[in-house]
Amino acid sequence: MTGQKNHIDLETRGKLKMKNKKSLLWLYAILSLVIIVAAVVVSLTAGISLGTDVGGGNQIEVKISAEMNTKDAVKKLESVLGKEGYISEKTFVEDKWTDTYVVEKTATKKIKNEAALKTAIAEKLEVSAEDVSILEFDGSVTNKAVIWTSVGVVCLLLALFVIGWIRYGVVSATTLTVVSLHALLMALSLFVLTRLPITMISIMEILASVVLVIFATILLLERIRENKKMKHNENLSAEEMVNLSSKEIRKPLIYILALSLIICIVLICVPVRFVILSALAMLVCVAVSVFSYYCLGTNLHVSMLTMQAENEKARLSRNVSPAPAAETKKKTTKKASK
């Protein structure tokens, strides 16, 4: 009687844990959906912050002396560009080690007379023409690269699903694909919401975060596959199996995460705006990877495995023949007649 009661208590506790898992999964899913929808709204209303190398345009850098007032330098540079008919997108001051630069980003695709513009800027800011540099970016070339990268990502997701289905089954393949897609969409959404510029480097960082999630999820699925083969793990529930496998692969993932954070902190300390923005972008991607794997991935896999086990159990119970019960009834009737 006590054993039966303990069994019922364990079963009730297991159901309660599963309910909490599902609640957490819904919470993470709703949070992710809110962030993605907010990013879509922001991108439609305020646009996406694209780096010059992605969106195209020009970047004008002027090296100024330490004595020059940076605010005055910015105003002078903007006034020169305004007179010359160039559209200003962003102006900022950047310290590169010991030198100070005023940087201007314009949406203008082509500068007609680069030498004349350099001379006008140099005269207005009272610097040498050699201290003025103009970098031109052709957005069309980069846009093609972005399009082909997008096609490659779609092909990667399809390949992940097919390979995952063949090796681990449809449930694991779905988890792997959904988590990878989630990491990609969340990273892009956070870039839009935080207004971090999307450059070719940040695109590579976003793809790196997706690869990190894929690596972590495949490690987990492989470990689950190996643990299922062991006899002493036969009676483990889906949650227990995932938790056991997750603990076994925790060390390498912690090392990768720690190394990524150390790199981010070191890069943030570098007094160059471009490097700092790249480090912040990397930090966003690392956060997305952790959230996608630990919060969404493991909970989603537990829920799907449990659902699969429950469906299988229900299917087997429906297929059980009622013959034994009928035979027992016949025997009882015969005894009574005798």
Image: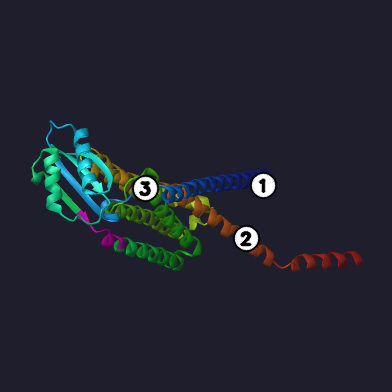
Label 2 belongs to which residue? 313
Most distant residue in the right direction? 337
Whether 142 is among the magenta residues is yes
Q: CA distance from mark 2 to mark 3?
A: 44 Å
User: Please, what is the three-letter code of the amino acid marked with disc 3?
Assistant: Phe
In the image, residue 169 above or below residue 41: below
Measure how far apart labels 2 and 1 are at the Cα level: 21 Å
Residue type at numbered disc 1: Gln
Asked if labels 1 and 2 touch by Cβ distance under 8 angstroms, the answer is no
| SS at mark 3 in the image | helix
Left or right, residue 170 beside residue 195? right
Q: Residue at x 61, y 47 (%)?
A: 15
Across and down, in percent, residue 89 comes to 29, 46
Image colouring: rainbow
Please state the extent of the stretch shown in magenta in the rendering. 136-143
> Of the residues under marks 2 and 3, which one precedes in the sequence?
3
Q: Which residue is denoted by mark 1 in the rendering?
A: 4
Q: Nearer the viewer, residue 29 or 24?
A: 29
User: Badge 3: how crowded within 10 Å, few (<14), some, or many (20+)?
Assistant: many
